[in-house]
Image (cartoon, helix red, strand yellow):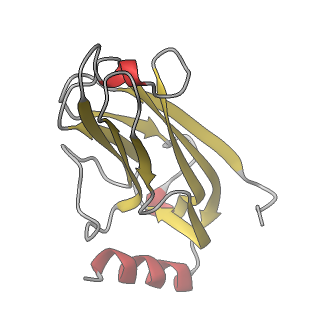
């Protein structure tokens, strides 16, 4: 159930060859971590579309022949330089997209694995920084650019001693 004071943050990243593409959503206007005022993510969603806004099509994989492509997307509470492992404490949402053509022009496989999508948190995922970092990476350049949309349902919160303890445990657990 959404809290009364929730609002939404969103952004879109566009693939660029095989490079890691990232952006930071500046949340400093909503937070003051030094006095315990933080942003809390209640839900996180990611979606894949073409740069034209439609679904991923066979032509986005290759103009002819057979092909397979993959892409990963993530959202973290700390800046990253590439996709991180699930053991990274700053990671709070992650998906992977796989697509393949066994016959030219026919999409034979399309799967979005959702390790953490949609991510929905009982008490929220506390962002103890001034940014939400989002990033995408692909091992092979797609024939068409792929957009990854990120949508976060969030609220601000003044941390109680109990929530500070929860945050410390989550940041140091592993």
x and y percentages locating residue 129 in the rendered image = 40, 54
Considering depth in this image, is 168 or 161 the residue closer to the camera? 168
Quarter-of-image position of residue 37: bottom right
- Image position of 63 (left or right of 127): left
x and y percentages locating residue 121 in the rendered image = 58, 69
Is residue 117 visible in the rendered structure shown here?
yes
Q: Quadrant of the N terminus?
A: bottom right
Residue at 48% from the left image edge and 78% from the top image edge: 164
Is residue 36 visible in the rendered structure shown here?
no
Residue at 33% from the left image edge and 40% from the top image edge: 135
x and y percentages locating residue 76 in the rendered image = 37, 54
For residue 105, above or below residue 3:
above
x and y percentages locating residue 173 in the rendered image = 30, 83
Residue at 46% from the left image edge and 28% from the top image edge: 56
Quarter-of-image position of residue 133: top left
Quarter-of-image position of residue 137: top left
- Image position of 2 (left or right of 74): right
Considering depth in this image, is 139 or 166 the residue closer to the camera? 139
Q: Quadrant of the C terminus?
A: bottom left
For this orientation, the residue located farthest to the right is: 4
How many numbered circles are shown? 0
Residue at 60% from the left image edge and 58% from the top image edge: 43
């Amino acid at each position: 159930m959404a809290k009364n004071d929730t609002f939404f943050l969103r952004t879109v990243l566009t693939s660029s060859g095989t490079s890691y593409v990232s952006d930071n959503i500046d949340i400093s206007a909503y937070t003051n971590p030094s006095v315990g005022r933080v942003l809390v993510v209640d839900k996180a969603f990611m979606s894949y579309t073409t740069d034209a806004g439609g679904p991923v099509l066979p032509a986005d994989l290759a103009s002819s022949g057979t092909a397979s492509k993959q892409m990963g997307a993530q959202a973290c509470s700390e800046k990253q330089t590439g996709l991180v492992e699930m053991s990274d404490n700053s990671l709070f949402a992650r998906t992977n997209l796989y697509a393949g053509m066994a016959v030219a022009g026919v999409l034979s496989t399309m799967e979005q694995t959702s390790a953490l999508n949609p991510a929905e948190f009982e008490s929220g995922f506390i962002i103890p920084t001034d940014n939400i970092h989002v990033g995408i990476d692909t091992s092979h350049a797609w024939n068409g650019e792929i957009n990854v949309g990120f949508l976060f349902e969030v609220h601000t919160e003044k941390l109680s001693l109990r929530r500070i303890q929860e945050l410390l445990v989550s940041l140091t657990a592993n």
